[in-house]
Amino acid sequence: MTSTTERPAPRAAKPPSWWERQGDLLMRRPFSEFTFTHMNWLMPTERVSRGEVHRPLPYESHRLDLTYRFEGHDRTLAELHRRTNTTAFVVLHHGRVIHEYYPGVFAGPRTRMQLFSISKSVTSLLLGIALEEGLVDSIHDRVVDYRKDFVGSAYEEVTLAELLTMTSGVGQLEAWDVPDSDIKRFEQAAMSGGDLAEVVKSAQRRAPSGEAFNYSTLDAQVLGWVLEAATEMSLASYASDRLWRHLGADRDAYYWLTRAHPRTAIGAGSLNATPRDVARLGLLMANDGVVAGRQVVPRDWIRRSRGSELPQLAVGELGPSGYSHYGYANQWWTLGGSAFDAFTALGVHGQYLYIDPSADVVIVKCSAWPTQDDEGRDRETIAALRRIADHFACAR
């Protein structure tokens, strides 16, 4: 029997269960080579239909024997793929597939790849379409104009423009290696059955709205929810009807959904599609939103995505949540200051949709990095992709 002056020894913290740790396990090499190509085996999904019209991409094989320079060394593309864990690599020039390579164990031309935050850039395209249709009135509307349940949260007065530029001021610096960080709680809720909306609503304001860039999966998720509320359609349904069926895609894409009901797509990171179909998105961006003569995404929205006039979004000015070689605009990463400079969509673990309008080059690189972020691998990848685009620009 314990005396009044004694206290029971504290229980050791219970180690997290497999269910609670599944996000970490699914993202770890070598398992990630499988999970990044089979998310539809692991999570509930909703289809993004390709439609009836298929437009095969012209194929014109081209040897890429070039080298790129990184950290004082000339390296080959074979070294790039080995050093940065490439699983799929597709290069388009003038709309033709001139090079593709699938070193991933489970990858191939018809394999649908987990795109992570490339999904954010697609959500931005869908918002541009919804604005053109009048389903969303203005980017200066507030979140609560569409989602009344966010009244009382830190997002109450945030505008869609601030979500698009990730200047909401809400949420922490994304830290995947901190167990109770906003992004880890978000991941756990999405994959293990928690209340994702409550996780997002619980995020705290860290800075005034509109002032500073802070890369935020939460901001992008709220943007996707606003889009669903405005269109009265699921993200997958709206993407199918307004975007995917116009691309001439090879395959249906899909979003994986949260385990908990009501199930919801992760507009910030759950789109899966084939590398060639991702390249088709790049062609749409390079061609000012036009596919086969049809204006699918408004031209002005595409141009808005290639660069921002906000000084805090300029290349080198993003602060601690963006590498110094990037700027940001409209849920896309910029690499220069004009509409004709290269820009890219990015996803953790090394996913790229790289577009150089001047060279008329689109490059898709899927990867299975051992960690979510890796500045060294990123810098090396961008150096190589720039070199490929420069090669074709000079050859014209």
Image (spheres, rainbow, N blue to C red):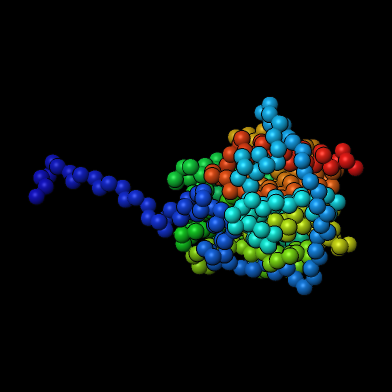
In this view, the residue in front, 331 or 50, is 50
Looking at the picture, how far across and down is residue 12, in whole percent? 27, 46
* Residue positioned most to the bottom: 52
Which of the 4 image quarters holds residue 277? bottom right
> In screen coordinates, is 275 left or right of 95?
left
Name the residue: 74% across, 65% down: 250
Q: Eyeballing the image, is 37 above or below 376? A: below
Residue occupying the point 69% across, 31% down: 70
Q: Position of residue 213 (x, y in %)?
A: 64, 40
Residue 318 visible somewhere in the drawing: no
- Residue 376 in percent (x, y) is at 61, 35
Q: Is residue 85 visible?
A: yes
Name the one closer to the observer, 150 or 81. Answer: 81
Image coords of residue 163 (percent x, y): 65, 49
- The residue lying toward the viewer, choosing from 121 and 388, is 388
Quadrant location, the C terminus: top right
Q: Is residue 379 left or right of residue 40?
A: right
Decide: is 138 above or below 55: above
Residue in the image at 54% along x and 52% along y: 32
Q: Is residue 95 above or below residue 53?
A: above
Residue depicted at x 76% and y 60%: 129
